[in-house]
Image (cartoon, rainbow, N blue to C red):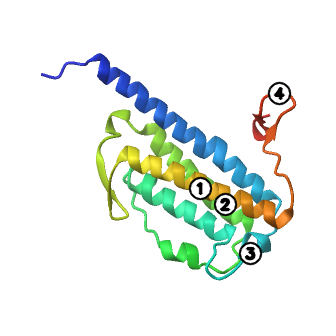
Amino acid sequence: MSVPTQKTSETNVVGEAFLAKARELLSSDYWPKIERSLEILSDEQIWWRSHDESNSIGNLMLHLSGNARQWIVSGVGGANTVRDRQQEFAERSLIPRTELIKRLRETLADVDEVLRRLDPATLLERRTIQGCDVTVLEAIFHVVEHFSMHTGQIILLAKMLTGKDLAFYDFSAGVPTPSWSS
């Protein structure tokens, strides 16, 4: 007999909170920082690499899009996505900043749509993504932490290449307020 319990209700609340936070971090925290970083860079700087074994910001942008599409849009959302992961890192042509921003913005919109529509009750369902047997929750957590790591790399490279403060936060009110939400 399946009788709704307080625990099921609490689980849905936790699942809804998890999904809301994942969406917020991807779209309202990491993405604005990436955009601000790219605003101060030339296309040549976006594709600069310190040596052949390192990644450029351009490669990281392609990689973030490919990863989020494979894990969330396809793996969680069920869309048919073809990914060439190796090409994300092998790319050496100078894809303009505007195109990179457009691609990642579209990917994040698709990711957000999947997460917005996702039933929290499915978070413990299993999926095979990139050869890994994971829960939906693990897939989402992977993308969020992966996005965070590469966002930090993009910020570091932008600061290193320009010597500029990206001024992500306004501290005038005594508490940090994201400068892009003003």
Q: Are marks 1 and 4 in contact (CB under 8 Å)?
A: no
Q: Quadrant of the C terminus?
A: top right
> Is tag 4's residue or tag 3's residue first in the polypeptide sequence?
3
| Vertical arrangement, residue 153 with respect to residue 85, above or below | above
Residue 48, disc: 3
Q: Is residue 113 left or right of residue 132?
A: right
Residue 87 picture location, percent across and down: 53, 77
> Is tag 3's residue or tag 2's residue first in the polypeptide sequence?
3
What crowding class fits label 2: few (fewer than 14 Cα within 10 Å), some (14-19), or many (20 or more)? some
Q: Are marks 2 and 1 in contact (CB under 8 Å)?
A: yes
CA gap between label 3 and label 2 equals 13 Å
Q: Is residue 144 left or right of residue 27?
A: left
Residue 174 picture location, percent across and down: 83, 27
Q: Is residue 172 left or right of residue 113?
A: right
User: Secondary structure beneath disc 3?
Assistant: loop
Q: Mark 3 vs mark 1: give the one in front.
A: 1
Residue 153, disc: 2
Q: Are marks 3 and 1 in contact (CB under 8 Å)?
A: no
- Give the residue type at disc 4: Gly
- Give the residue type at disc 1: Met
Report which residue position mark 1 lands on: 149
Residue 42 picture location, percent across and down: 82, 68
CA gap between label 1 and label 4 equals 28 Å
User: Foreground: 165 or 128?
Assistant: 165
Report which residue position mark 4 lands on: 174
- Give the residue type at disc 3: Trp
CA gap between label 3 and label 1 equals 19 Å
Residue 104, disc: none
CA gap between label 2 and label 1 equals 7 Å
